[in-house]
Amino acid sequence: MQRISSRLLFVLVAGAVLYLIVSRLRIVVLVHVSLWQALLITAVVIIVVFLLLDHLINRSSGSSREE
């Protein structure tokens, strides 16, 4: 079950990031980057947002380790 929710979260984050990039396409077009640089920046943003949301969800779900 955890794996399915993790995949769903990744798809939602990727969709949100791509939507924000497309909705602000005029700004992206004005920046002179190659296709590979744009793909790398997009991938890094998707991964960072995914990891942040995953951390916040796991932290707020009450599954904290007590030693």
Image (cartoon, rainbow, N blue to C red):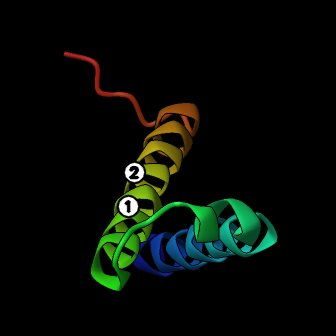
Q: Say what amino acid the circle numbered 2 marks.
A: Val
The picture quadrant where one finds residue 20 is bottom right
For this rendering, which residue is in front, 37 or 54?
A: 37
For this rendering, which residue is in front, 6 or 14?
A: 14
Question: Looking at the image, how many numbered discs can be counted on the residues?
Answer: 2
Report x, y in % for residue 1.
Answer: 48, 77
Q: Residues within 10 Å of mark 1 (few under 14, many from 20)?
A: some
For this rendering, which residue is in front, 55 or 46?
A: 46
Q: Say left or right for 66 vs 4.
A: left
Residue 46 versus residue 34 in the image, above or below: above
Q: Residue 60 carries which label?
A: none
Residue at 58% x, 78% y is: 8
**Secondary structure under badge 1?**
helix
Residue 10 versus residue 4 in the image, above or below: above
Residue 64 versus residue 2 in the image, above or below: above
The picture quadrant where one finds residue 16 is bottom right
Report x, y in % for residue 56.
Answer: 52, 37
Mark 2 vs mark 1, CA separation in Å: 4 Å
Q: Say what amino acid the circle numbered 1 marks.
A: Ile
Report x, y in % for residue 46.
Answer: 46, 64
Residue at 39% x, 51% y is: 48
Q: Name the residue under label 1.
A: 47
Q: Say left or right for 19 vs 2.
A: right
Q: Do the residues labelled 2 and 1 touch (CB within 8 Å)?
A: yes
Q: In which quarter of the image is the C terminus?
A: top left
Q: Mark 2 points at which residue?
A: 48
> Which residue, as the protein is rendered here, is positioned at the far left?
67
Residue at 58% x, 33% y is: 60
Q: Residues within 10 Å of mark 2 (few under 14, many from 20)?
A: few
> Which residue, as the protein is rendered here, is positioned at the far top?
67
Report x, y in % for residue 5.
Answer: 54, 72
**Secondary structure under badge 2?**
helix
